Image (tube, coloured by chain):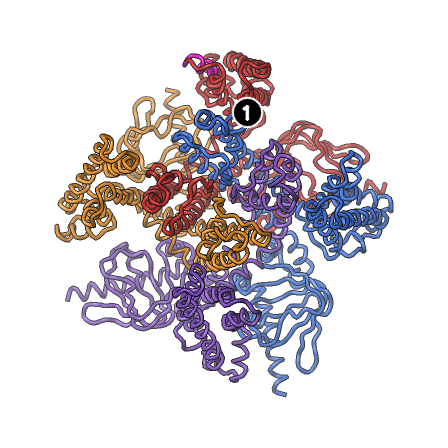
Chain colours: A orange, B red, C blue, D purple
Amino acid sequence: MHRPGGPHRSRLPVILPELVSTAGIMAMIADTGTRPGSAADLVLSGIVTGVWCLFVAGYALQIWSAPEAPELHGVSAWRARRDYMLSASGWIDLLAALALPAGWLTGLPGRDAQLLAIVWALKYIRRTSGLTLLLRVMKRALPSLASVVTVFFVILLMAATLSYVFEREAQPGAFSSIPQALWWAIVTLSTTGYGDMVPATIAGRLLGAVVMVSGIVIFALWAGIIANAFAEELQRRHFLKTWDLVADVPFFQDLGAAAIADIVRLLHARHVHAGTVVIREGESGDSMYFIVSGEATAMLAPEPVKLKSGAFFGEMALLFGTPRSTTVVITKPSVLLVLDVADFRVLAGKRPELVNVIEAEGQRRRDANAALRRD
Amino acid sequence: MHRPGGPHRSRLPVILPELVSTAGIMAMIADTGTRPGSAADLVLSGIVTGVWCLFVAGYALQIWSAPEAPELHGVSAWRARRDYMLSASGWIDLLAALALPAGWLTGLPGRDAQLLAIVWALKYIRRTSGLTLLLRVMKRALPSLASVVTVFFVILLMAATLSYVFEREAQPGAFSSIPQALWWAIVTLSTTGYGDMVPATIAGRLLGAVVMVSGIVIFALWAGIIANAFAEELQRRHFLKTWDLVADVPFFQDLGAAAIADIVRLLHARHVHAGTVVIREGESGDSMYFIVSGEATAMLAPEPVKLKSGAFFGEMALLFGTPRSTTVVITKPSVLLVLDVADFRVLAGKRPELVNVIEAEGQRRRDANAALRRD
Amino acid sequence: MHRPGGPHRSRLPVILPELVSTAGIMAMIADTGTRPGSAADLVLSGIVTGVWCLFVAGYALQIWSAPEAPELHGVSAWRARRDYMLSASGWIDLLAALALPAGWLTGLPGRDAQLLAIVWALKYIRRTSGLTLLLRVMKRALPSLASVVTVFFVILLMAATLSYVFEREAQPGAFSSIPQALWWAIVTLSTTGYGDMVPATIAGRLLGAVVMVSGIVIFALWAGIIANAFAEELQRRHFLKTWDLVADVPFFQDLGAAAIADIVRLLHARHVHAGTVVIREGESGDSMYFIVSGEATAMLAPEPVKLKSGAFFGEMALLFGTPRSTTVVITKPSVLLVLDVADFRVLAGKRPELVNVIEAEGQRRRDANAALRRD
Amino acid sequence: MHRPGGPHRSRLPVILPELVSTAGIMAMIADTGTRPGSAADLVLSGIVTGVWCLFVAGYALQIWSAPEAPELHGVSAWRARRDYMLSASGWIDLLAALALPAGWLTGLPGRDAQLLAIVWALKYIRRTSGLTLLLRVMKRALPSLASVVTVFFVILLMAATLSYVFEREAQPGAFSSIPQALWWAIVTLSTTGYGDMVPATIAGRLLGAVVMVSGIVIFALWAGIIANAFAEELQRRHFLKTWDLVADVPFFQDLGAAAIADIVRLLHARHVHAGTVVIREGESGDSMYFIVSGEATAMLAPEPVKLKSGAFFGEMALLFGTPRSTTVVITKPSVLLVLDVADFRVLAGKRPELVNVIEAEGQRRRDANAALRRD
């Protein structure tokens, strides 16, 4: 559940760690292509070391400033620091700070110690909050995946053994043992097909054909299971996130739980910066908006009208199919709920009372506009 | 939303730009296989230049004729021209006209300047109105795709670093630096498997197996997300397009919004040329038709009957399971709504009142036919 | 719509054409590996010619016996013959009969003329009635596929042009022209990756990475669209086929169209040979059966009971969770509707009145059994 | 249908067979890489023989102890033994015991006889109960798969014949006969692309492009069909398993079948060991729990409260959005039904009466807690 301001652990600019770790990883990668001791090597190593210093300092700063993080408000300073250090974020930051020293301590030469900087890539994962999502998806898919993985391993072992039996005489170099044949089996079962080991006998080629087709079937099952689990989890997230927002809009509050559960599926949340033009006069429109929090301004002719949280706008294009009759600008950072025209019509079927309210308001605004123009 | 006549920007034959750009691209491609200065080279270069002239002339003509385009009716001539030039279509046409001069101006030799003609391929995209669709799909899938793409990059970087560590001693030529190893990682992670770089050590092969399987899992997630978003967007389009048509048919107009939302999901729109035989006497039938606009003629025995917009036909095969009792020909360009037999039965369950009307009409027509035959 | 006996065009054994064409194709394939004029060559050519004779004879016989086909009953003999010859089946049979002569007439040497025997493979397609299904699926998926195919071609052309630009200096042999580069592009975009052409420059490899990933995304879209269309079409087929059967069972006939539409989704048709043991005493059971046509016999203790079309059996295991209390054997070729235990419970929620009838009957049978055992 | 204790055939530790067979297979695989007669060979062969002895002993023990298996209670000892021997489990155990002797009897040298030990891999399949699932899925998908498989074979045969025709002159060594070309066709159709055979002519490359794209389309269909069947079968399993559990909870027993069918889709079963902490005080919570069987203890302040089967807990975090107010520990092995917060809200819409009961209880507990704290 994304809340505005939620992902900011401290006051540090939010995207800085990713930029810094990208620079560090790029330098480390490029450095492997230089001659040791050359000028390029020295510069790139310097960048890596510099980035590492930044991460050490950053980690210290994060620990120190942890009590100021908004979501840890009301917790004692030491508890806040401990919480940060034990969070996934904290562990990744610690790992990033320990990357180079770990290499030095184990006595690796400098250029090799630097390779451990690759753990800085973990900083990207933290950023997308994707780790939690992927873990939930995997947990959901696990029981079904288990049986497919088992079948995968059984086929892998059988294919390797059979290919060894079929090919060891024709190609004693390539298929010299089952561990060698296992490499062929995995390369073929995943349809990667490097071509470094290729069956030459008829039996081996028939086996190869079966392995390729099995590979595709197994990965089809695999893909189906994971994609299903992913879709379900995303739907669950959307439902929960939108529910919280819908419950904050007075317009929906009088509805029973059944109606809200229906509506939540049709709405989509959007976080909008101040200054964004959501609706532009004269354009054709295919959605209307409810303001959850923040403020929008409708640029009406005699004087602009402020729309506060709880208000809605953009309904006229949906009701009458006309172009947008006015421009609406967001004047404070806002959270909007968007209702697409297709979903509006589904809603009109399921919850006519709601749409009647919107229609009455739309008609009232239209009449008001017409009256203004007559004056 | 496809409206008849909508995609025609001007009176130019609609498919011409695609044919011309195909000829130009084919000539350009073939020209790269000729010896510079040979007869074939001169002919093919000539075709490319000719096509370019056509596109320049076409662009000028489009600007000049923009005010005549039907969907810009009522707009001032200059505004219509500006609108065309700023549309996606206008930008692609401009790019096509600038392709060769851009090459010449940057001082490329003639044969190389010609390669820029490849931008003419963009003309195909405009044609399918697919760009808008694909952009909407991508926008819908973006938040979910982001986390998978992040994981993809993290695995890619880690795989490259590890393979460099494992393989650099065994194959100092191939795995000489991480940038080199990145090429192996992407070729393996996408299961392309060229075979130009293949791990030779046991650790490298284990890593390879993990990378292949990860690749398939990541792309399974990717595929699942995109396919889901695509399906939802297509459903939305179909709903909106059919809704507009259903609302134009008097037969459906008395129904409430809830009933229409149900029906819209069951109907499919079809644009039909004059002269098309929709139903042929004696064939077995599995759908009935509602006329949104246009005209159809039922070839009945004493004299043909004209069916105007709002009428329906083909219901008897659905009601009585008999072969088509008459031939129906479209006599003016028409828009039909098609109701499949399976959906007809679903509709009979959900909206019996509608099907009763159809049944009464079907029975009336059957009796009329029988009476005619008795005479 | 499969009807019992429907696929039998005549009295010829149904599977014979497939066996014969398999033999012919195998012989033709094997013959390409023999030395011309060797004994093996002569034998295999003889088999191919023999199979061809059979197909010529078969085609003549089919034309002659067409009027006896059950689904053409009541049609004049000549009309029946014409109908057969113009059907997909007829065209494939004609093609099979013309395969070898077509080769001889165009002056191909004997061994090459034989290669045309590959068209016999089309006989398999006729058999699965899959051609119609696949055509309907493709028609359904066409509009969505079109835009993806367009994007596919645009990427293919751009990738080939760019790879030619990037690689022509580093590898003038492999990337000598855009037609050459197109081969690399398709091999990479489909992630086949033969490895015969591999980019060597940094720009070429970056392009390669983008092409591989694009390939997977495009094919993910493609797969999603086709799989969706396939699933919808299969559902439609199942609905229609089951609907016809449900309407024949008196037990369901009193229900309204809405109830039948619900039930049809839960039932699965099964064609059963005489002698099949559908239920075996003492086994645990997870489905019940309705007899659409044919006859079953319940092996009850004092004397077996015949169950005619319209009856149902197997409900006790679902109602009471007990093992099957009796064995039921099919005594005439039958069509059954199967109701799974999960779907039975869904039905109990949606249509309690139906399940009450089944429960009453189940209770009656149980009491009768108990009474018999008491005696 | 998993019941606690169900998968235990006898009192032997459950995971032992898998560990032993893993050890045996690893030794057999490693042994193929050793020099015959070397020390390593002798040790590894010894392990394989030892594992085989264990399997022989295990099979005998299983037969002997079969009557003690809980699910065969009440059956005569000989019948229980016969049932075990004829079960899938029994057959796999027999096969495992016969692996080595089968090799010796057929006169294979010792090292080759050992290769038959690969059948021990089948022990993994038994463990996941995945065999039954996969067989049911395949049975469900069979009719649709059949037509795709047919098309696959037709394309394979045609591609091989055409590539032979196109390439035999350019590459007489590689494409020397259709059986050779078949290997190219399957490697290309599955997009494996070893690169050992690559078309060189223009016609051959166009054919190659078509084959690659066909391959992806066919496997997309294949994947779609299998994934669909898998998803349906998993849903069916979940429905049946949860239904049995829901029917055991008094809280749900008063509901009609329709309500239960709704609820079953929202609940997920979880088997929990004694000692597990299901809820921890102060954490945020996103699910509530119903106890089907077993016992949980809520660690309330004055004295812990025991929750028996039929009770529910964790509802307060869902109702009031507060952190968990108490820790709940499982004190006897239990089966729980989990209700996620998203599903709870869906349930609130569909079945308000149920949620009212939960709310009343939640409010009562909250008041009780507050009263306790006031004291």
Nearer the observer, A77 or B270: A77
The structure residue drawn at horizontal position 39% and vertical position 20%, both measured from the top left corner, is A374
- Amino acid type for the residue under numbered disc 1: Pro
Left/right placement of residue B76 relative to residue C259 reads left
Please identify the residue farthest to the bottom as the structure is shown. C375
Question: Looking at the figure, which quarter contains the C terminus of chain D?
Answer: bottom left
Judge whether C23 appears above or below B95 on screen. Answer: below
On the image, the x and y values in percent for residue D291 come to 36, 68
Left/right placement of residue D192 relative to residue C26 reads left
Report whether residue B14 is seen: no
On the image, the x and y values in percent for residue B347 come to 60, 47
Q: Quadrant of residue C327?
A: bottom right
On the image, the x and y values in percent for residue D166 come to 65, 36
Left/right placement of residue B154 relative to residue B57 reads left
Report whether residue A58 is seen: yes
Nearer the observer, A325 or D74: D74
Highlighted range, magenta: B98-106
Q: Given the image, what chain letter belongs to the residue carrying mark 1?
A: B
Nearer the observer, C342 or A233: A233
The structure residue drawn at horizontal position 69% and vertical position 59%, both measured from the top left corner, is C248
- Is residue D248 covered in magenta? no
Judge whether A11 appears above or below B294 on screen. Answer: below
Dot 1 lies on which element? Answer: loop
On the image, the x and y values in percent for residue C78 come to 87, 44
The structure residue drawn at horizontal position 36% and vertical position 50%, both measured from the top left corner, is A134
Q: Which residue is mark 1?
A: B7
